[in-house]
Image (cartoon, rainbow, N blue to C red):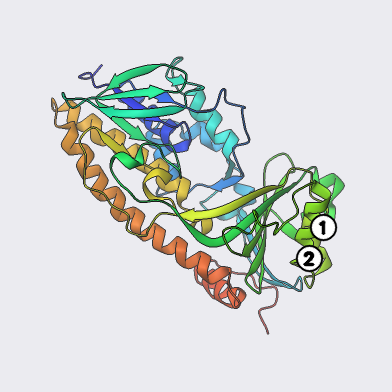
Amino acid sequence: MKKHIRIAIIGGGPGGLTLARVLHTQGIAATVFELDEHPLSRPQGGTLDLHPESGQLALRQAGLEAEFKRIARYEDQETRLYDQTGKLRLENADASSGDRPEVDRSALRQILLASLPEGVIRWGHKLRSVQPQADGTYTVAFENGESGVFDLVVGADGAWSRVRPLVSDAIPAYCGVSFVELGLDDVDTDHPEITRLVGHGTMFALGDSKALIAQRNANAHIRVYAALRVPEDWFAQGGVDLTSPESARRSLTTYFSDWAPELLRLIANSNDRIVPRLLYALPIGHRWENRPGVTLLGDAAHLMSPFSGQGVNNAMLDAAELAFALSHALEKGGGWIEAVKLYEVVMLDRAEEASAASAQGLDSAIAPDGLAHTLEWMQGILEPQEADSSN
């Protein structure tokens, strides 16, 4: 074991768990405090495409490359773009040959959990406070009455981080777009027409500042996001009638009433789990003055919209870089506080670029001319096999 340092990781998402795992491989102990009561307390969200230079790199550095390849769906990398009439405008030529395989969040979390020694994760711990002490340590207290003293507190606790206020007064701002999340089960058997529409990967249908986005998950499940540019209080003001699943499907369909029937099946055939989701982001270029003993990673540091696909990838890379920065400093006998400071500089520079791309992607896609912008962007990053790109 290296020189002892007491590390509290607040949050057991991909970033927090990756940090704990890479630290463990380097002989450094840490404790993860997670709000959830147990691993299956709540759904973990949809599928992710892990990038080779970030998410996959972090897993390799965590010694989990083989485990990742067992759950990665290389066959589900297809991308399709439709207009609101249901006309296919662009698709991948060979989705299975890409280097950004899909993986379900729940499966990713499971391999990370399985890689950690028993007792590293403390479930059911809702953070109450983090109090600085005169000796430079921090007392971390939880709603269940437990507390502990730590040398380093890492906020990996997401968009509404309770650790962030120790270093920054920034508050996430509404991006102007809200999602309604839906899902379809057993699509290959029960909804073969939707299977054909979505394909093996993710499809986008764009038009008139709206979108229907569908992504294939494992176990013949398709997750759907209906996106609309609406005010922040749209749900609160009854923008979608959420009193029952049937009323929600019916009222949501009215916003897409002039869209093709085959696209509207994504709403009409969805199951009864319908979840409103508002998109928030921290300011592009969010930074803070380093405070010894506290740092952030992932959404706590650089929350962005999902339109760059870099959120979880950046969080996992943050975690790996922080772990190795601490390891190298401790190998040399100390200096870990300066190592954290340098980590923040590199991480925040990288996050600024990703945040800018994410904001641009969202503003371009959910816009009156979102189809044209997105078509041009996809043509630039894919080797497309166009179904029909004529106007």
List x then y, in percent, for residue 310.
46, 52
Residue 47 lies, with reference to residue 370, above or below; the image says: above
Q: Which residue is mark 2?
A: 254
List x then y, in percent, for residue 375.
58, 73
Q: Is residue 60 left or right of residue 247?
A: left
Answer whether residue 70 is visible to the viewer in this image: no
Q: Residue furthest right?
A: 190
Which quarter of the rendering shows the N terminus?
A: top left
Residue 22 lies, with reference to residue 167, above or below; the image says: above
Q: Is residue 92 left or right of residue 270?
A: left
Residue 323 lies, with reference to residue 290, above or below; the image says: above
Query: In percent of the image, x 63 and y 59: which residue is there?
Result: 234
Residue 276 lies, with reference to residue 356, above or below; the image says: above
Q: Which mark is residue 158?
A: none
Badge 2 marks a residue whose secondary structure is: helix
Q: Nearer the viewer, residue 96 or 91?
A: 91
Dots 1 and 2: beta carbons under 8 Å?
yes
Q: Nearer the viewer, residue 226 or 237?
A: 237
Q: Which residue is mark 1?
A: 250
Query: In percent of the image, x 43 and y 63: which residue is there?
Result: 357
Answer whether residue 105 is visible to the viewer in this image: yes
Q: Nearer the viewer, residue 214 or 296?
A: 296
Q: Amino acid at mark 1?
A: Arg
List x then y, in percent, for residue 69.
54, 37
Q: Categorize mark 2 by other alpha carbons within 10 Å: few (<14), some (14-19), many (20+).
A: few
Q: Amino acid at mark 2?
A: Thr
